[in-house]
Amino acid sequence: MIVTLRKQSDKQDVERLIQQLTLKGIEVNYSEGETHIVLGLVGDTTGVDITWIRSFQFVQDVTRVAAPYKKANRQFHPEDTIVDVAGVKIGGQEKIAIIGGPCAVESKEQVLRIAKEVKEAGATLLRGGAYKPRTSPYAFQGLETKGIEYLCEARKETGLPVVSELMSIDKVEEFEKHVDLVQIGARNMQNFDLLKAAGKMSKPILLKRGLSSTIEEWIMSAEYIMAHGNPNVILCERGIRTFEKYTRNTLDLSVIAIIKKKTHLPIIIDPSHATGDWSLVESVSLAAVAAGADGLMVEVHDQPECALCDGSQSLKPKKFKEMIEKASQIAKVIGREL
Ligand code: PEP
Ligand code: MN
């Protein structure tokens, strides 16, 4: 971190700042130039709040040289993290994971039917929301505990590990017991109490990017989970809010390469929420695989017109299977496989 001070700064004030930084374990290199004083901060500055330094009125500018995250940082952990989800490995250079299933668990029969279909198509994990974060309080809110129960039955029938969204801290125990991959949704990406609780769980976490979050904010949320003890975090890009209205969200594909550069965590793409339109899901999925995504999470429904949530962005099982076959070909070209 580089701190620039005004030349006229009071020597005692500067001394006091240096002392406080030294107490935080930071080495401070002082140099006085013609027009400014520059402090070069060396050491772990992740715990140093830039706004605190700016609050000293003789400080003119502060620039971070190192990223504010440590545990998620590729610099300190050069190898790819491979997250084990009940035996299915996500991340690394070879396999690309496919997660398929309905937006919401609607009934036992529905989830069992779709689970069998997605497995047959080649998915290695089953998704299904039991607690749904809906914009309208009058929309279907999910089957809650019953939904988790039906998801577990689908796992028993198919052998597919299950992914479901945790919305509240008071359900941590239920998820710890029954869910293989715990999803933190876009709307809760900065629910810091929930992130801390996820950090204390033994299950891997699927952290979606917030509706309007920067990449750094997203990584900092992963850092929260990791700093509280859980190193098994998978990132999921699901599109962000922009001025574009044609799609539900705007998929940021560049994020795949950026996340891989900045962090060692796996990144998967959710083409369903990214587009909001089933007819766009295939092309976006193929692009994501080509761009190096470690997985796809796709909404699949056998009767989209009857779906209680997100039918318009759900692929029918046949289309899902075709998409996987095409994605498989793309994966081969880049030396990976599904
Ligand atoms: C979901 O995956 O069902 C979901 C609600 O996604 P997001 O949090 O990305 O909107
Ligand atoms: Mn959905």
Image (spheres, rainbow, N blue to C red):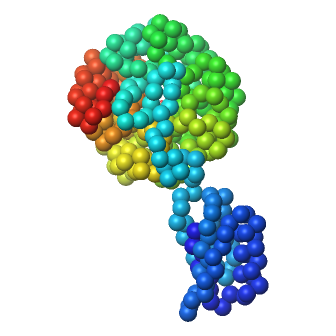
The one of 103 and 229 positioned closer to us in this rendering: 229
Q: Is residue 26 above or below residue 17?
A: above
Any part of residue 79 in sight: yes
Q: Residue at x 47, y 33 (%)?
A: 82
> x%, y% of residue 335?
27, 34
Q: Residue 142, located in which quarter of the rendered image?
A: top right
Is 117 left or right of 76, judged from the image as shown? left
Q: Residue 119, located in which quarter of the rendered image?
A: top left
Q: Residue at x 57, y 76 (%)?
A: 61
* The C terminus, quarter of image: top left
Q: Is residue 126 above or below residue 26?
A: above
> x%, y% of residue 5?
62, 82
Q: Is residue 150 above or below residue 216?
A: above
The one of 155 and 169 positioned closer to us in this rendering: 155
- Please state the total of marks drawn on the protein image: 0
The one of 224 and 147 positioned closer to us in this rendering: 224
> x%, y% of residue 71?
58, 47
Q: Residue at x 33, y 40 (%)?
A: 292
Is 285 left or right of 31, judged from the image as shown? left
The one of 78 and 158 positioned closer to us in this rendering: 78
* The N terminus, quarter of image: bottom right
Is 39 left or right of 206, judged from the image as shown? right
